[in-house]
Every structure is written in structure tokens, then in C-alpha cells.
Image (cartoon, grey):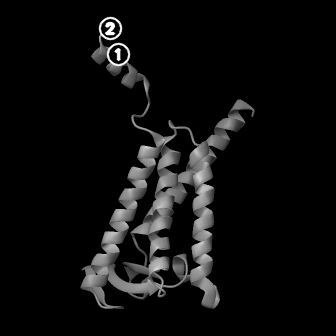
Amino acid sequence: MDAVSAREAGSAVRPWTGSKAAWFVMVVGSVLAVDVVTKLAIQQSLHLYEQVPIIGDYIRLTYIYNPGAAFGIQLGPHSRLVFMVLSVVALVLLGGMYWNTPIHDRVRLTAISLVCGGAVGNLVDRIRSPHGVVDFLDVGVGDVRWPVFNIADIAVTTGAIFLALSLWREERQDERAGI
């Protein structure tokens, strides 16, 4: 077998090309880049609290600062510091999950990477601004609205859902195997 055939045969056996670290860096970097670019674009093109309809009143851009966590949760005057520390703790825990996740578990690796990318995006905002995290995606109908959010929030939420599903799937497989 020549070198090309050996390489092709080897790649056919592997369920996923690339390393865990490369995939992690690519997903985290992509989330972070899109998050930072969109937040900067909003800050440069809108005034604070300005609203711009995208699809009628259903989807609009609304530039705000969120000093708390998701859904405007606040813990008083120290919210910024508390959520910075919680973000770092979460990133450390996710690092442990990443370390223990096998390379073939693409769903879990992607989920962990999405959560990490979003957490880093919002952490960067908390570090750089005493006002909090820049949020701008505003969805709802009339006065019934979802709390304003950003790309990092989408990544964290999507990653958390897929991580929960991945862990649930693994638990069910363990139960079936009698572990």
C-alpha cells in the first residue's frame, strides 16, 4: 500500500478529523469573534437604549448594558465581581469536562466549546466595562418580550442544552449496559 492509500485508509477509520484542541479553539474562537464583532458594531452604530426594528416589532436591535447575569439576574452592587468569579469557576469546570471527553464525542465537545466561547465573550465584557455586558437582540411581541440577549448568550444556551442532552444520552446508555 502506498503512502496516499495508507493515509486514505487511516482517515476512513477515524470518526472525526482533527484534534480535540483544534476543534475547541475553532469553536471558541468563532463564537468569541462573532460576539465581539457584533457587540462593537452595535456600540458604534446605535445609541444606548436605541431600538431598531429588524422584523417589525418581533425582532429588533436594542442596545443595553446588562450588569447582571442572564435574564437580568442581579446580586446587588457586587454583581459584576460575583459573575466574573462564577464565569471563571464555570470555565475551570468545563475545562475538566473537556479534558475527560473523548475525541469521538463531537456533540459534547462542541457543546462545551460553545458554552466556553459564550462565557469568555461575556467575561470580556464584564472585565472591560463597569456597565456590564452589551446585549442587543430583542425578541417578542408588543410588551411581551424575552430579556435582551447577545451572541454569547445564544452560544451558552445552545451549548448547555446540547451538553445536557449528551450527558442524558450517556446516562441512558450506561443504564442499558447495566453500569
Q: Look at 35% across and 84% down and name the residue there.
A: 62
Give the amino acid at mark 1: Ala
- Residue closer to the observer: 154 or 84: 84
* Image location of residue 24, percent across then percent down: 45, 49
- Circle 1 — which element? helix
* Image location of residue 95, percent across then percent down: 58, 53
**157 up-or-down from 131: above or below:** above
The residue that label 1 is drawn on is 6
CB atoms at circles 1 and 2 under 8 Å apart?
yes
> Residue 77's quadrant in the figure?
bottom right
**53 up-or-down from 37: above or below:** below
Q: CA distance from mark 1 to mark 2?
A: 6 Å
Q: Look at 38% across and 51% down and name the residue there.
A: 26
Res. 146 visible in picture: no
Marker disc for residue 45:
none
- Whichever of labels 1 and 2 marks the residue nearer the N terminus, that label is 2
**101 up-or-down from 40: above or below:** above
* Image location of residue 111, percent across then percent down: 50, 52
- Is disc 2 surrounded by few (<14), some (14 to 19) or many (20+) residues within 10 Å? few
- Residue closer to the observer: 27 or 176: 27
* Image location of residue 6, percent across then percent down: 35, 16
- Is disc 1 surrounded by few (<14), some (14 to 19) or many (20+) residues within 10 Å? few
The residue that label 2 is drawn on is 1
